[in-house]
Image: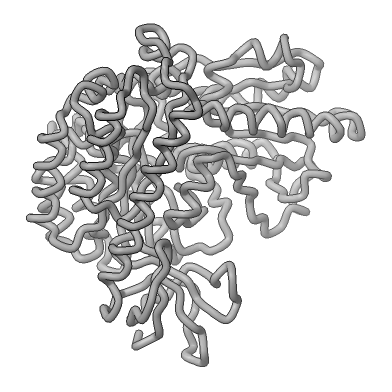
Amino acid sequence: MELLDLGAKEHDELRQGEAYKPFIKDPNLYKKHFYIESYGCAMNFADSEVVASILQDQGFGATNNIGEADLILLNTCSIREKAEQTIRKRLTEFRKFKTNKSGLLVGVLGCMAERLKSKLLEEEKLVDLVVGPDAYRSLPILIEEAETGQKAVNVLLSRDETYADISPIRLDSNSVSAFVSIMRGCNNMCSFCVVPFTRGRERSRDAHSILAESIDLFEKGYKEITLLGQNVDSYYWIDEVNTHAVTFAELLEKIALISPQLRVRFSTSHPKDITDDVLFTIAKYDNICNYIHLPIQSGNNRVLQLMNRTYTREWYKAKVERIREIIPDCGISTDIICGFCTETEEDHQDTIDIMKYSRYDYAYMYFYSERPGTLASKRFKDDIPEEEKKRRLTEIVDVQYHLSLKSNQNDIGKTFRILVDGESKKDANFWKGRNDQNKVAVFEKKNHGILIGDYVQVKINSCTKGTLLGEFVSF
């Protein structure tokens, strides 16, 4: 979020609990091995790369063969109930490995570890280690404790941990795109969200370390980085040496200036923090991608207030228009939750209306899943029947299908600069990549001498709702 390089469909699959298993070049260099699966948001995938670095320093090599692992780790998500159910199922499946291999340790990392803590250790007896998002530095000590038969746990949240000094081990296989974490935690306290309770308060990473990591990635051949945070636009770091505050717009510019050949993306944004400075910076540099993920969650003002989203539908519409005024060809995607507490049919139709107004290129769409410990779970009754939630979600998905298809149809006949990141999953005779607006494009290989990591010009001839289909024009 990395690297795992994701288009819209792949992102959606991961948010529903698909695992990413690391690509390992030479697992035979180490006496002990760890196997890690990551679930949920891009931050979890970036965190897994930090964990890999910490473990490698302790003599553990990563492996994608679960049978040879001495340590199995699940980096987990608590944002939806389905994600937690997936993790519980996987932990149950791992029991057979523990039975067949003496000394094998199983650990849970991330948000689910933070939320459930001792329940995972004591009540379910599925794991040996439980480690929260701010406690990865303690993994070596916790592993030692677990090896003696003790249950090892550290889920303490930190006010200042950013892992800025740890160089992540890139677990991907394409060496084209990488995640760079710029901040952790969140201060927004949306009533439906568990993140502030599992990842703590917001803190920004040292800008110098971000720049150094980005330069290092480019020098190693990476062509694209994605700046990550729960709310990247609120990035704010004080350079005490130069007595200067670095904003997100300034950080974006610093990264863009590394090289015109390095693409820059970022995720995720809260609408309230997308400033004109950020928009003008995107417009100024060709290598900052013209794409913004702008979660709306609901199109109804009353529901937005219950969600504590701090904006109205009218304000959000004006923000969409401002984005398109400054960056005319900007791609926009969103998050939508239907069936939130007390949502009426009229409220639901307001969401449909704002979807059509905003003309999203794609969206991540869910029905509301109450998460224990959130403000909504304490204040409101989850009173919409699941059958009704599913009906509303079906309608939202149908509307977005047509919006995505229309958006892609508008690109037919256009030529885009595509960063090639691999072969098409459906046909090895085709390359795939993404354009500036984060749309996935595929085109036939033929004999053009194209390599993964190349920028190519591709003319779009047809499309599906999720993919642009084109032909190679030139390098």
Please determine whether, in this image, residue 182 is positioned above or below residue 135: below
| Residue 101: percent from left, percent from top | 89, 34
**Type of colouring:** one colour
Residue 144 in the figure: left or right of residue 40:
right
| Residue 336: percent from left, percent from top | 34, 37
| Residue 420: percent from left, percent from top | 44, 72
Residue 80 in the figure: left or right of residue 414:
right
Q: Residue at x 35, y 51 (%)?
A: 400
Within the image, what quadrant is residue 318 found in? top left
Could one spot residue 219 in this view of the protein? no
Within the image, what quadrant is residue 295 found in? top left
| Residue 208: percent from left, percent from top | 29, 43
Q: Residue at x 52, y 90 (%)?
A: 446
Q: Residue at x 71, y 34 (%)?
A: 90
Q: Seen from this angle, which residue lies furthest top?
A: 378
Q: Residue at x 23, y 53 (%)?
A: 359
- Along the viewing direction, whichever of 15 and 70 lies nearer the viewer: 15
Please determine whether, in this image, residue 156 is positioned above or below residue 247: above
- Along the viewing direction, whichever of 432 and 117 lies nearer the viewer: 432
Please determine whether, in this image, residue 249 is positioned above or below residue 125: below
Within the image, what quadrant is residue 118 found in? top right
Q: Quadrant of the C terminus?
A: bottom left
Residue 257 in the figure: left or right of residue 451:
left
